[in-house]
Image: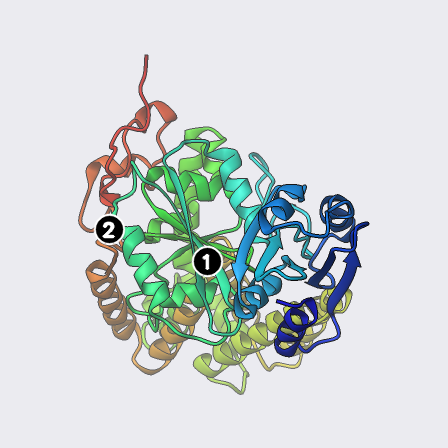
């Protein structure tokens, strides 16, 4: 095929000024052309490993001789403009040769990306500091760095009709239940969507109930946590363009654990896990219980505390339910504004909201001091377990509405319904509330009570791992 014809076919599809065509010839007159996307290719390596070796190519060089002359460590062959266009979009450089139908794709991609750094949402005082990035190749390398076992599998799929996003399913073949990776790949392949921007899209694909209030996939931004979950018998999902990895099966108890729990004393880790559970319960129920006690059941409040609250709420124009609803609404607005605004402006908004609005509202007699304290403490408690904030913040609103309309009976009834829902839910054959429902005594050693490393000799029974033993004492 003539070189000009091959270039026209590719440029006819990739009609964009950032698609560069570089034509050059060898010393004996053999014509070549490189087609690549500007910004996705390392130009220095392209000149050193491709252009320079071909400068001495003979005029009648065959495809085999051209490939042998290339110094690039990664060279693929494809035929046709469609295949070449796809490889160029991935960041490869297409080498076209005059008189040859074969197109050589050199893997000298260098897409823009940030360096490996500590993730902002999973900060630990002790333990590794590395976090995933938006480059899936870097993320796979971080996993390979920690798990050097030959049984580690990384199966890469493509999803998204227009984005053609790479998705890698990671698992240990001799540990993970073989049905889990197969089901994951089927779920990902059968969903057709134009654009996949983040791993949360894929999380919806692989969830049995994507509209549920409770998530079905674990999330993490640190390779050490990701690899630890793989070694327990889970499967992981890495998505190109997202620093957040997914793991399945997911158990609700995972979010109350921290990577730091495994680097500190087991006694301190046990105290922290119990503290997290109590904080989440208090964050969800405290505003609702306060409103229900004021409206329907004053006996829930100690007498001396009741006298202080009565003096604070006397003369307020709003009912306890409306007052708490308004205070919680202002808190959510301030939280959203501080997150969305630029860094320094967001800090100023937080100070204004906490000092000016809060103090002024109390002095003006619009809200009471106990309501401000309860809402602020509730917000702090929910962020003790940041992975559950979306769920627990929504449940806090539901509990508040029920408490203001039905009272303590409604709170107890909704707690019962919520527990019934949780104990009946499962994903990929693992109950959501495992190891508590159904009760698995062996798995409780890494539950609310964190035992030392010598007690964790076997993998969690709830995950149905092939290899049950993970630690042997010699």
Residue 199 seen in this snapshot? yes
Report the quarter where the N terminus lies. bottom right
Local crowd at mark 1 within 10 Å, few (<14), some, or many (≥20)?
Answer: many
Local crowd at mark 2 within 10 Å, few (<14), some, or many (≥20)?
Answer: few
Q: Which mark is residue 179?
A: 2
Real-space Cα distance between discs 1 and 2?
A: 18 Å
Report the quarter where the C terminus lies. top left
Residue in front for this viewpoint, 66 or 455: 66
Q: Secondary structure at mark 2?
A: helix
The residue drawn where x is 51% and y is 43% is 223
The picture places residue 143, in percent across and down from the top left corner, at 50, 41
The picture places residue 296, in percent across and down from the top left corner, at 32, 77
Residue in front for this viewpoint, 114 or 333: 114
Q: Is residue 176 left or right of residue 142?
A: left
Q: Residue furthest right?
A: 27
Q: Is residue 74 left or right of residue 259?
A: right
Q: Is residue 13 left or right of residue 291?
A: right
Q: Is residue 134 above or below residue 349?
A: above
Q: Is residue 316 above or below residue 126?
A: below
Q: Which mark is residue 286?
A: none
* Residue corresponding to mark 1: 167
């Amino acid at each position: 095929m003539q070189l000009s014809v091959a270039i026209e076919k590719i440029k006819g599809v990739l009609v964009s000024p950032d698609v560069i065509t570089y034509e050059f010839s060898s010393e004996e007159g053999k014509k070549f052309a490189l087609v690549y996307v500007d910004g996705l290719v390392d130009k220095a390596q392209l000149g050193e490993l491709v252009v320079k070796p071909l400068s001495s190519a003979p005029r009648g060089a065959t495809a085999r001789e051209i490939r042998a002359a290339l110094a690039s460590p990664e060279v693929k062959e494809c035929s046709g403009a469609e295949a070449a266009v796809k490889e160029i979009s991935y960041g490869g450089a297409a080498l076209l040769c005059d008189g040859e139908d074969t197109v050589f794709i050199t893997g000298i991609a260098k897409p823009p990306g940030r360096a490996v750094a500590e993730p902002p949402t999973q900060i630990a005082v002790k333990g590794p500091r590395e976090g995933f990035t938006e480059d899936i190749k870097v993320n796979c390398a971080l996993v390979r760095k920690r798990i050097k076992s030959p049984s580690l599998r990384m199966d890469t799929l493509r999803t998204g009709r227009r984005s053609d996003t790479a998705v890698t399913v990671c698992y240990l073949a001799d540990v993970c239940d073989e049905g889990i990776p197969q089901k994951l790949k089927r779920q990902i392949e059968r969903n057709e969507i134009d654009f996949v921007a983040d791993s949360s899209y894929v999380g919806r694909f692989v969830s049995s109930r994507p509209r549920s209030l409770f998530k079905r996939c674990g999330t993490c931004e640190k390779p050490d946590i990701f690899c630890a979950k793989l070694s327990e018998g889970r499967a992981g999902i890495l998505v190109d363009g997202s620093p957040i990895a997914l793991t399945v099966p997911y158990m609700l108890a995972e979010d109350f654990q921290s990577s730091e729990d495994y680097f500190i004393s087991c006694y301190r880790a046990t105290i922290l896990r119990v503290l997290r559970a109590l904080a989440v319960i208090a964050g969800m129920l405290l505003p609702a219980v306060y409103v229900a006690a004021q409206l329907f059941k004053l006996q829930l409040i100690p007498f001396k505390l009741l006298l202080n609250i009565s003096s604070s709420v006397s003369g307020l124009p709003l009912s306890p339910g409306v007052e708490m609803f308004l205070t919680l609404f202002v808190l959510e607005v301030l939280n959203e504004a501080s997150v969305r605004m630029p860094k320094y402006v967001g800090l100023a908004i937080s100070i204004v909201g906490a000092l000016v609005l809060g103090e002024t509202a109390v002095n003006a007699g619009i809200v009471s001091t106990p309501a401000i304290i309860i809402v602020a403490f509730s917000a702090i408690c929910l962020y003790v377990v940041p992975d559950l904030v979306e769920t627990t913040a929504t449940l806090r609103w539901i509990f508040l509405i029920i408490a203001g309309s039905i009272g303590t009976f409604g709170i107890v009834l909704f707690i019962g319904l919520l527990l019934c829902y949780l104990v009946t839910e499962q994903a990929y054959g693992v109950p959501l509330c495992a190891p508590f429902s159904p009760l698995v005594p062996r798995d409780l050693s890494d539950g609310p009570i964190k035992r030392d490393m010598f007690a964790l000799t076997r993998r969690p029974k709830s995950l149905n791992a092939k290899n049950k033993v993970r630690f042997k004492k010699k």
